[in-house]
Amino acid sequence: MSKELGYVLVTPYTLRKSRTGGVIGRLVSTTGLDLVAARMYGPSQELVQRYADLIRSEEEVWPEMRELLADYIEREFLPQEDGHVHRVLMLLFEGEDAVQKLRDAIGGFEDSVESADTIRGTYGDFIKDHDEHVTYFEPAVLAGPTREIVRDTLALWAEFSESDGGILDNAIRLAEHQNVQKTLVIIKPDNFTFPSSRPGNIIDLFSRSGLRLIGAKVLRMSLAEALEFYGPVQPVLRDKLGSIAVKRACKALKEEFGYDMSDDVIEALDGTLGPSFGDHQFYSIMNFMTGQWAPDVREEDLDKEGKVRCMPLVYAGENAVEKIRAILGPTDPSKAAPGSVRKEFGTDIMVNAAHASDSPENALREIGIVKVAEDTIKRWYDKYYN
């Protein structure tokens, strides 16, 4: 069976209640599909109306539910009169039988009555009164029930991806606060080695910050991006790790030959072994983040997509940098506090689950390098349907 593309829209309510991590973790771990794209939208009035009209035209869905869904979208997705928008997160999944697998994981609208083995059973609500009238409806997520509806829905959202998607500075609730900071989190490639709940669990931990998630992307980092992103680290590694390597080398030589190395030998090692070891560690970081060994890649291929995935996220709110780094924990997972991201999911200093910006200035620099605002939805739509 060939691969196909499926989508999930995380509703504003689910985002406000910080249930996004739980939803992503459940979707990835239960479907086994690859999460290939993510984009935050602040739907405009035109997108909302056209999406509601599209749902009303879907004959595969029974009429009462079509109207209930369309009314829900017009009520919950529509921007406010002052221009503030609601957040909607689009996730794209790729794999065999993706549409049906997503439907099975999400469940039906009435699952919320007595089930917890689906997304809607856990996070949705579908409440009726004694006369069977729906009194409260929250679907938690939306997804296309057929390949044709998936195609039509993705065509619409791809059309508005540039204008309505990206990093949402004008999101409701966020826009009301002063002194808002942005910070970048990157969920590292070790969390995407195989389909698991790890990425969602990490997002769930960051939700304790009380910050707003206003941007998201799935990225295969190119070597050019990695070199720019981690470039400032290279001289630090040459200096700190280089001196450590020289000391260890001198100790090993003394044990082998039985005498202390002269100053001339130490100076020679400082100028050769030290920088070489620092560069090796630097290239190891590049390899971890891109799946490529930098010295072996031709210059004309530096801008090509890497071979491993990561997930950049932009959070915003007061003291965003400090709050996120407190939840992340120190670089060395063995020194991190229980309950922190790196203590729970990190392995060593490099394979330590996630990155977070260390200052508001660096956050803006890093967000620009990984291009969180860049549209990837249309590219995936074109790959499958154009």
Image (tube, grey):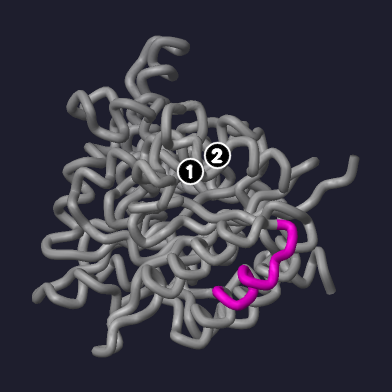
User: Looking at the image, is 248 positioned above or below residue 279?
Assistant: above
Residue ID for mark 1: 24
Few, some or many C-alpha atoms within 10 Å of disc 1 (few <14, some 14-19, many ≥20)?
Answer: many
Query: Could you tell me which quadrant the N terminus lies in?
Result: top right
Residue at (45%, 77%) from the top-left corner?
43
Measuring from the top left, give residue 344's x and y in whole percent: 32, 26
Along the line of sight, the residue nearer the viewer: 128 or 256: 128
> Is 299 or 348 nearer to us in this picture?
348
Tell me if 14 is positioned left or right of 312 in this view: left
Give the camera-side residue of 238 and 160: 160
Residue drawn 31% across and 52% down?
356
Q: How many labels, in total?
A: 2
Q: Is residue 54 visible?
A: yes
Which residue appears at 43% of the width and 65% of the height? 72
Numbered disc 1: secondary structure = helix
Amino acid identity at mark 2:
Leu
Which residue in the structure is indicated by mark 2?
Answer: 27
Quarter of the image with the C terminus in it: bottom right
Tell which of 330 and 126 is nearer to you.
126
Q: Percent from the top left, x then y, of residue 50?
A: 58, 81
Is 60 placed above or below 177 here?
Answer: above
Name the residue furthest left: 178
Question: Residue 150 occupies which quadrant of the picture?
Answer: bottom right
Is residue 268 visible in the rendered structure shown here? no
Circles 2 and 1: CB distance less than 8 Å? yes
Q: Is residue 46 found inside the magenta-colored segment of the image?
A: no
Read off the magenta span: 52-60
On screen, residue 348 versus residue 59, left or right, reads: left
Q: Residue 67 in the image: state x and y as whole percent.
A: 54, 66
Say if the magenta span includes residue 59.
yes
